[in-house]
Image (spheres, grey):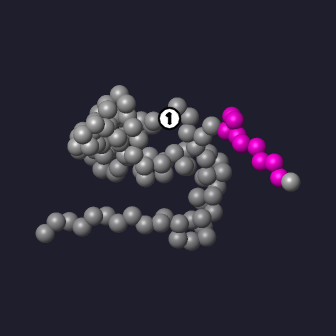
Amino acid sequence: MSTPKKISANPIRTRKDWEAAREAATRDPGAFHGDIALRELFWLDETNGAWVKRIEGRAPWLAFDAVTGARRDVALPVDWTPWARAFDDGEAPFLTVG
């Protein structure tokens, strides 16, 4: 029998958890949301021609060939990101009410 997969759960279970998450998102929104995005979305790594997603374990990246969709290995460092800046508020949108 195979080992059951680890089930992910919402880490925010208490008011204290919520406050800590809110403080982290306020302090550095790029790092807070960037960490979530690396784990939850696949990103195109054009250098390796693969769609990649950060996972826990010995091999830090789950990757699929961008052309064939076949599972493959990539040699990306653990701290690789598909962006140069995680949160760019340089051209924030303006909201006009009224």
- Read off the magenta span: 89-97
The residue at the point 44 percent across, 46 percent down is 38
x 63%, y 63%: residue: 19
The amino acid sitting under disc 1 is Trp
Residue sticking out furthest to the right: 98
Q: Which quadrant of the figure has residue 31?
A: top right
Q: Is residue 55 above or below residue 47?
A: below
Magenta segment includes 93: yes
Q: Is residue 20 above or below residue 47?
A: below
What residue is shown at x 65% (from left), y 48% (from top)?
Answer: 27
What is the x, y in percent for residue 55?
35, 49
Location of residue 6 in the rendering, given as x and y in whole percent from the top left corner: 31, 64
Residue that badge 1 annotates: 83
Apparent side of residue 10 relative to residue 78 in the rendered image (left or right): right
Give the residue at x 48% y 64%.
11
Q: Is residue 21 magenta?
A: no
